[in-house]
Amino acid sequence: MSYLYQHGLAVMRAQPLHIGHERVIKTMLEKCARVTIILGSIQEQGTVRNPFTYMQRKQMILNCFSENTPRLKVMGLFDINNPVQWAEFVLDFLNENMPERGRPDVYFAGSPYDAQWFKDSFAHIECIDRTNPEFPYVSGSMVRDMITIGDSRWKNFINPLNHHFIEEFMTPKKGEF
């Protein structure tokens, strides 16, 4: 099979993995021979903004893309809280941990805002914009808020393969509130 790119990269938190993230990964798999997903903020877990561990988020991705595991690599990375150095930090991390995959030749983002951190590091950036009127708007904050207030519509934004996973970790148990 012929691909447009050799190696695609995306950085996301996926707290939780939602249909927007899936759309980015699916597009990457269609266009790239190799795909690397870096899950950021691995130092954060169990908080309102970052409820899931790195391993839980990685499993959500693998649940949805298990048939692509030979081409798909999911890794975790701590944040450095330095936007100016973020792209270089990510690319150095990849070079040190996966030199055999080669430097990515394209960066994929879920919005122009997410893409801005890598604009000077890549000749090719593909933005799979979450504000596209032909695709439902979704954000991790929106989904987490729905789950927190008990709005069952969160299931419209999460792959059914991960419903039980989300319910296990995010649905309040009796007596917690």
Image: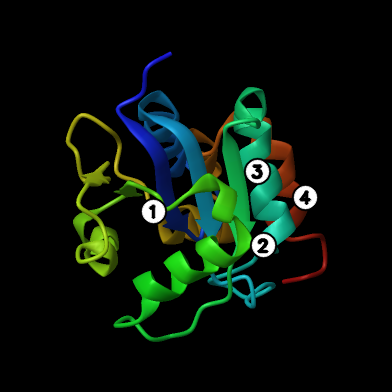
Q: Is residue 163 something that shows in the picture?
A: yes
Q: What is the number of callouts on the image? A: 4
Q: Disc 3 designates what residue?
A: 60
Cα separation between marks 1 and 3: 16 Å
Q: Is residue 170 left or right of residue 4?
A: right
- Residue 27 disc label: none
Q: Is residue 9 above or below residue 113?
A: above
Res. 168 mark: 4
Residue position marked by numbered label 2 in the rendering: 52
* Residue at the extreme top of the image, as rendered: 1
- Tell me, yes or no, whether the two marked residues, 3 and 2, touch with CB atoms within 8 Å: yes
For disc 1, the marked residue is 139
Name the residue type under label 1: Ser
Secondary element at tag 3:
helix
The residues bearing labels 2 and 1 have C-alpha atoms spaced at a distance of 15 Å
Q: CA separation, marks 3 and 2?
A: 10 Å
